[in-house]
Each structure stands twice: as structure tokens, then as C-alpha cells.
Image (spheres, rainbow, N blue to C red):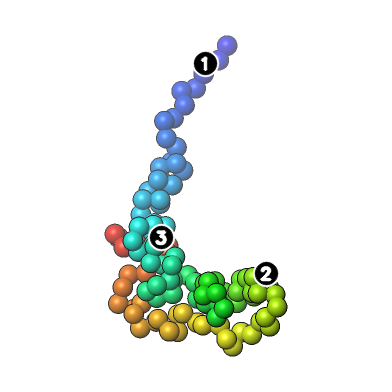
Amino acid sequence: MTGKAKPKKHTAKEIQAKIDAALTNRGGGKAGIADRTGKEKGGHAKYECPHCKITAPDLKTMQIHHESKHPKIIYEESKLVNLHAVLAPVAELKPKPGIRGSLKK
């Protein structure tokens, strides 16, 4: 009979995942809230619906939103508000949350 191998407590992959999770900005906290709501610089939400003020990251998502929530109104890309163009000067002064990497490095 062969003996049972003693299992490792932590694998190298597991340790690397913990290090990555600790050093990567996942968009949490106060900076993450500001990024998700888009109040400071638009965040990941680049476009704003002119009818209900909901935000979307790209034109395709905004078109899907418009077709489902405003089916009687004609979709026009020219009426969409580009939050990055409107709020861009404020964004350059502050750290960018939600971007892979860490400010700790």
C-alpha cells in the first residue's frame, strides 16, 4: 500500500491570487462609489440617457436600454450626453478607480 501524500496548505496559484486581489483596485470604497455613479468624471458610464438620466458604458448598451425602456421614442445618438467629454477636466486631477493596478506600488 502506498501512503497518502500530505496536501499543501496553500498552492502557488492561490497565494498569487491573494496577492493580486490585495494589490488590484477592484473599484470598492469611496472612489469606487464615485466611479460607479459617475458623479465626478463619468466613471465607466460614458453616456447618459436624455430621457431618464440612466448611464451606460457604450453606445450599444445605451441602444439596448433605449429600445427596452423607451420604445415609443426614436433613438438618436446625437441626443446622448457624453459624460467623459463634459466632466473630463475634473478627472485628470484625481486617481482613477476601476483601472487594473494599484496606487500602492
Residue occupied by mark 3: 27
Q: Are marks 2 and 3 in contact (CB under 8 Å)?
A: no
Q: Quadrant of residue 61?
A: bottom right
Which residue shows up at 43% across the image and 67% down it? 37
Residue 71 located left or right of residue 28? right
For the residues carrying marks 3 and 1, which lies nearer the camera in this image?
3
Q: Classify the position of the C terminus by image quarter.
A: bottom left
Q: Is residue 19 visible?
A: yes
Residue kind at label 2, given as amino acid type:
Ser
| Residue at disc 2, secondary structure | helix
Q: Residue at x 29, y 59 (%)?
A: 104
Task: Give 53 or 48, whichever is nearer the viewer.
Answer: 53
Residue 55 location (% of width, % of height): 52, 72
| Between marks 2 and 3 in the image, the one whose residue lies nearer the viewer | 2
The x and y percentages for residue 14 are: 44, 41
For residue 68, the mark is 2
Q: Which residue is mark 1?
A: 3
The first of marks 3 and 1 along the sequence is 1
Which numbered mark, 2 or 1, is in the foreground of this view?
2
Whole-angstrom CA distance, mark 2 to mark 3, is 28 Å
